[in-house]
Image (cartoon, rainbow, N blue to C red):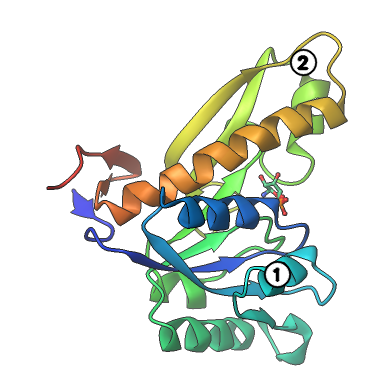
């Protein structure tokens, strides 16, 4: 069983392609003093991502990196790794980042890239997870924080929250309820890393009691 990061105030990098409400909720948890971390940078692969605007409002360095400026994914990720290493990043937090992460980035941040997904994985990976759950007819869904591997939403699971699906739910109402829970669990999952509580045994994430 191996510890992923020893207890410390974490240097975080956040990657977002869109709205950035999870980014905002993590920033808010830090501001309240509930999360022992500092967001060193917000990186987006989309020039018009609202997350970039939010970063400016929060006085956080915001960087747009265009994957199309690089000949291939390795070269793009090499640039990301350089940026992240320069800032001494402990944990890379994907928050609505709409790309698969490749081996160049994952090998430099082994088990230290995490993501949030709006379904109870391994059910409904990929896009439109809330719509997939409604259409399938499951009675419960939720959200999952997981370690990123090279697959699509397939890495070891850190934390999940279960929510019922109501008869009158629409994709919009369900998305809204799940998002409220996302904003509660993501920073809590990150705080487990900051307290040195996260261990990996095979593909099982073990959360140990808080270190003193
Ligand atoms: C969230 O639903 C998250 O689960 C998914 O993408 C969405 C991002 O929303 N991965 P936001 O940009 O954090 O508001």
- The answer to whether residue 100 of the structure is visible from this angle is yes
Q: Quadrant of residue 56?
A: bottom right
Give me the residue at 44% from left, 40% from top.
157
Distance (Cα) linking label 2 and label 1:
40 Å
Q: Is mark 2 within 8 Å of ligand 1?
A: no
Give the camera-side residue of 69 and 33: 33
Of tags 2 and 1, which is closer to the observer?
1
Give the camera-side residue of 58 and 183: 58
Residue at numbered disc 2: 137
- The answer to whether residue 122 of the structure is visible from this angle is no
Q: Quadrant of residue 137?
A: top right
Q: Position of residue 62 (x, y in %)?
A: 66, 78
Give me the residue at 29% from left, 45% from top.
202
Asked whether, in this view, residue 110 is left or right of residue 14, the answer is left
Asked whether, in this view, residue 133 is left or right of residue 117, the answer is right
Q: Position of residue 176 (x, y in %)?
A: 77, 33
Q: Position of residue 201 (x, y in %)?
A: 25, 44
How crowded is the residue under tag 1: few (<14 C-alpha within 10 Å), some, or many (20+)? few
Looking at this view, name the residue that lies furthest to the front: 32
Which circle's residue, 2 or 1, is located before the other in the chain?
A: 1
Q: Secondary structure at mark 1?
A: helix
Residue at numbered disc 1: 57
Looking at this view, name the residue that lies furthest to the top: 167
Q: Secondary structure at mark 2?
A: loop
Task: Relative to 82, say whether 101 is above or below.
Answer: above
Give me the residue at 52% from left, 86% from top.
83
């Amino acid at each position: 069983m191996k510890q992923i990061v020893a207890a410390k105030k974490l240097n975080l990098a956040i990657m977002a392609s869109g709205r950035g409400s999870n980014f905002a909720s993590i920033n808010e948890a830090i501001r309240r003093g509930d999360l022992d971390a500092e967001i060193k940078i917000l990186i987006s692969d989309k020039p018009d991502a609202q997350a970039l605007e939010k970063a400016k409002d929060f006085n956080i360095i915001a960087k747009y990196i265009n994957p199309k400026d690089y000949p291939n994914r390795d070269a793009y990720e090499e640039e990301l790794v350089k940026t992240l290493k320069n800032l001494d990043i402990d944990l890379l937090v994907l928050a609505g980042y709409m790309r698969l992460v490749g081996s160049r980035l994952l090998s430099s941040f082994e088990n230290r890239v995490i993501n949030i997904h709006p379904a109870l994985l391994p059910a409904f990976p990929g896009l439109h997870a809330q719509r997939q759950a409604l259409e399938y007819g499951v009675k419960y869904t939720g959200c999952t924080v997981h370690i990123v591997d090279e697959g699509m939403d397939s890495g070891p699971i850190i934390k999940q929250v279960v929510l019922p699906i109501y008869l009158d739910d629409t994709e919009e109402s369900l998305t809204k309820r799940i998002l409220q829970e996302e904003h509660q669990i993501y920073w809590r999952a990150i705080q487990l890393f900051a307290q040195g509580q996260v261990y990996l045994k095979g593909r099982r994430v073990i959360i140990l009691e808080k270190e003193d």
